[in-house]
């Protein structure tokens, strides 16, 4: 009877999957909930996660909290794995109706005291406009 090797972390699991089954699909996201599939392979996921991790490590976010301000999708998944690879603590925040939720976002930022915030360029533009006149704590 053969035993599967013991893995010590999710990072080790993804690394092994990328090495052994790199071209296989790791995740599929349905953009409208039913169709519009977007896929990412294990190899692509690991490459993107490592790039994000390198950036976070340069920002000294290792062992620190990082807010992930993403809608559902592959960008969120790669950012989450990037945090794992960097040794950062991911703090997911769903950007629903940003204009109405500035106080909620302020409260999360005040509580989490993140070293970095990861998001899309579209959401960044929205958030920058929201905080032009609003206090950010």
Image (cartoon, helix red, strand yellow):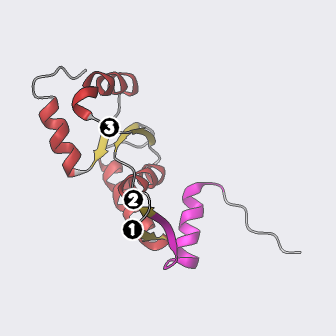
Could you tell me which quadrant the C terminus lies in? top left
Q: Secondary structure at mark 2?
A: helix
Q: Which one is in front, 51 or 79? A: 79
Categorize mark 1 by other alpha carbons within 10 Å: few (<14), some (14-19), many (20+). few
Categorize mark 3 by other alpha carbons within 10 Å: few (<14), some (14-19), many (20+). few
| Earlier-in-chain disc, 3 versus 1 | 1
Q: Residue 13: x, y in percent? A: 60, 62
**Extreme-front residue of the structure:** 34
Q: CA distance from mark 2 to mark 3?
A: 17 Å
Looking at the image, residue 79 lies above or below residue 3: above
Q: Residue 21: x, y in percent? A: 56, 78
Which residues fall within the magenta stretch?
8-28
Could you tell me which quadrant the N terminus lies in? bottom right
Q: Quadrant of residue 36?
A: bottom left
Looking at the image, residue 85 lies above or below residue 38: above
Name the residue that disc number 1 marks: 38
Categorize mark 2 by other alpha carbons within 10 Å: few (<14), some (14-19), many (20+). some
Q: Which one is in front, 38 or 127? A: 38
Looking at the image, residue 68 lies above or below residue 23: above
Q: At x 41% / y 71%, what residue is drawn?
A: 44
Mark seen at residue 129: none
| Earlier-in-chain disc, 2 versus 3 | 2
Q: Secondary structure at mark 1?
A: strand
Name the residue that disc number 2 marks: 74
- Mark 2 touching mark 1, by CB under 8 A? yes
Q: CA distance from mark 3 to mark 1?
A: 22 Å
Q: Which one is in front, 92 or 82? A: 92
Name the residue that disc number 3 marks: 96
Q: At x 43% / y 69%, what residue is drawn?
A: 40
Q: Residue 38: x, y in percent? A: 39, 68
């Amino acid at each position: 009877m053969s035993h599967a090797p013991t893995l010590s972390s999710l990072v080790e699991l993804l690394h092994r999957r990328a090495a052994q089954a790199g071209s296989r699909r790791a995740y599929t996201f349905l953009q409208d909930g039913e169709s519009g599939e977007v896929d990412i392979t294990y190899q692509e996921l690991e490459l993107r996660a490592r790039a994000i991790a390198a950036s976070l490590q340069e920002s000294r976010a290792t062992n620190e909290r990082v807010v992930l301000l993403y809608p559902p999708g592959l960008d969120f998944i790669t950012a989450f794995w990037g945090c794992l690879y960097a040794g950062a603590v991911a703090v997911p925040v769903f950007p629903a109706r940003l204009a109405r939720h500035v106080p909620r976002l302020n409260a999360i930022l005040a509580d989490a005291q993140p070293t970095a915030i990861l998001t899309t360029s579209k959401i960044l533009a929205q958030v920058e406009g929201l905080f032009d006149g609003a206090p950010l704590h």
